[in-house]
Amino acid sequence: MKGQLKGIICIVIAAIGFSFMTFFVRLAGDLPTMQKAFFRNAFALIIAVATLLIKREKFVIPKNCRLDIFCRCLFGTTGLIANFYAIDKLDLADSNMLNKLSPFFAILISIPLLKEKPSRLDIVATIVAFIGALFIIRPTGSNMELVPSMIGLYGGFGAGTAYVFVRRAGGKGAKTPVIVICFSLFSCLLTLPFLIFNYIPMSPKQWIIMIMAGLSAAVGQFAITTAYKFAPAKKLSVFDYLQVIFAALWGIIFFKEVPVPLSIVGYIIIMGVAFIRWEKARRSESE
């Protein structure tokens, strides 16, 4: 129980860190999405390399999981870019919640990639979660936020698919710092051409804000990694949704964003089914 409490504290810290990352990405203002993504990943790359050096581990990519790592990088990077685009175009709470559909996408992608058979609860929870997403996306011809919402939905898909490839690569022997370095380097290389040809000079304030976005993301990444060392994902995953609550608070306080009633209904549905899955997993563990 003591380890679980430490895990919960760490994942709450991670939720705060990631919510501040989205806040700073929005606060940076009218900068190209690719420019924001580059600087966020550049800081992550520096931290990941430093971690590898401190641990004195070798940078080795096992031959049998190179394709898995490449797919993790591809889907993770495109998902991150989509998420950043959604952050700029939607309310912070909406963009965060669409990204938090990633566990449900992971359930679907795990079927062909990991040959995992989802339980009946997983299937029902996934269907209900996507119904909840419709309340946020509101796919009507009059909804001006439809395209950003669909891009934000892809952000959740990219993240969920990336998680599955991380699990598959990890199961084949790939080390976590190596996967992180590959992802961060791939992201920087993919966004670098856009940065070079479409770079917008940043003010000292914007530089500080982007540094804070990178640091906030690093805090979130290290905290969530530490959390899952103290307790399994099934006992912690529901607390990760606190990120949406924190993001909604920052949106209300700093950007005067008040989620529309339909979005709130969507939040309740998605977090509700996430809670039910977590509670079922917790009870199964204790039996």
Image (cartoon, rainbow, N blue to C red):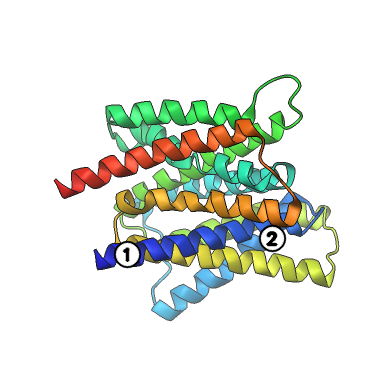
Circle 1 Cα neighbour tier, 10 Å, few/some/many (<14 / 14–19 / ≥20)? some
The quarter of the image holding the C terminus is top left
The quarter of the image holding the N terminus is bottom left
The residue where tag 1 is placed is 5
Total labels: the figure holds 2
Residue 155: quadrant of the picture: top right
Q: Look at the numbered disc 1 and give the secondary structure of its residue.
A: helix
Q: What is the x, y in percent for residue 44? A: 57, 65
Residue extending farthest to the left is 287
Q: Residue at x 29, y 55 (%)?
A: 232
Q: Give the vertical position of 137 relative to 76 (above or below).
A: above
Q: What is the x, y in percent for residue 46? A: 58, 71
Circle 2 Cα neighbour tier, 10 Å, few/some/many (<14 / 14–19 / ≥20)? many
Q: Nearer the viewer, residue 93 or 178?
A: 93
The residue where tag 2 is placed is 24
Visible in this render: residue 106? no
Q: Is residue 24 left or right of residue 30?
A: left
Q: Give the vertical position of 249 relative to 208 (above or below).
A: above
